[in-house]
Image (cartoon, grey):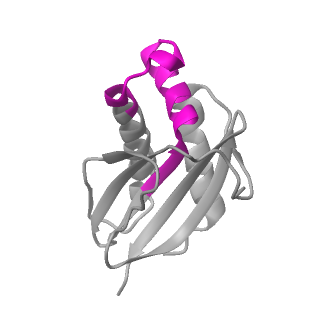
Amino acid sequence: MSLQDHDIAELTERVWSSFLGLDLSRTEWDATADLATCVTGCVQIAGEWNGAVTLHCSEPLARQATSILFETEAAEATFEEMQDTIGELTNMIGGNFKVLLPQPTQLSLPAVIEGSDYSLVIPGTTPQHVIHFESDGRPLRVSILAKCQ
């Protein structure tokens, strides 16, 4: 597969902008970024290409996205609404990525986790693309993990 980081960044920015109406810009990862509490979405892809797409963001950014989608105040966003929002964003990014892959492929339903001090491990995969963004100064990371051959 010959996709480059800029291809993944472009489709992520397009989904973010069209779904939420927010700007998203690439950035270098700031290790001091506010990620005390995070929300992570994941979809797996199986078929001619096998792997996963993850979306990892700060809780404030997940709340902001949820408030836009559900037309509520960010402070009022429930965990279930944040799960729906991050799950749908992950699904849309994964679906746009899936179109660029050799076919046939299948996309799983999204899984979403939230909390602090956790790591998401998808056994048998290795990061192929890890792209950092920010939206309104809040961090977001999209990773493409490919199944090891």
69 vs 6, nearest the viewer: 69
Q: Is residue 146 above or below residue 35?
A: below
Residue that lies at the very extreme toward the top in this rendered image: 72
- Left of 21 or right of it: where is 95? left
29 vs 115, nearest the viewer: 115
Q: Quadrant of residue 77?
A: top left
Q: Position of residue 92 (x, y in %)?
A: 41, 42
Q: Is residue 71 above or below residue 85?
A: above
- Residue range corresponding to the magenta coloring: 54-82
Q: Position of residue 129 (x, y in %)?
A: 55, 68
49 vs 139, nearest the viewer: 139
Q: Quadrant of residue 97?
A: bottom left
Residue 80 lies within the magenta run: yes
- Left of 114 or right of it: where is 47? left
Locate the C terminus and report the quarter of the image it occupies.
bottom left
Q: Quadrant of residue 23?
A: top right
- Left of 71 or right of it: where is 148? left
Q: Is residue 27 above or below residue 104?
A: above
Residue 23 lies within the magenta run: no
Please tell me how many numbered marks the rendered image carries.
0
Residue that lies at the very extreme toward the bottom in this rendered image: 149
Q: Position of residue 54 (x, y in %)?
A: 44, 55
- Dominant SS of magenta comes to helix
Q: Residue at x 62, y 50 (%)?
A: 10
Q: Position of residue 71 (x, y in %)?
A: 47, 12
Q: Residue at x 31, y 65 (%)?
A: 103
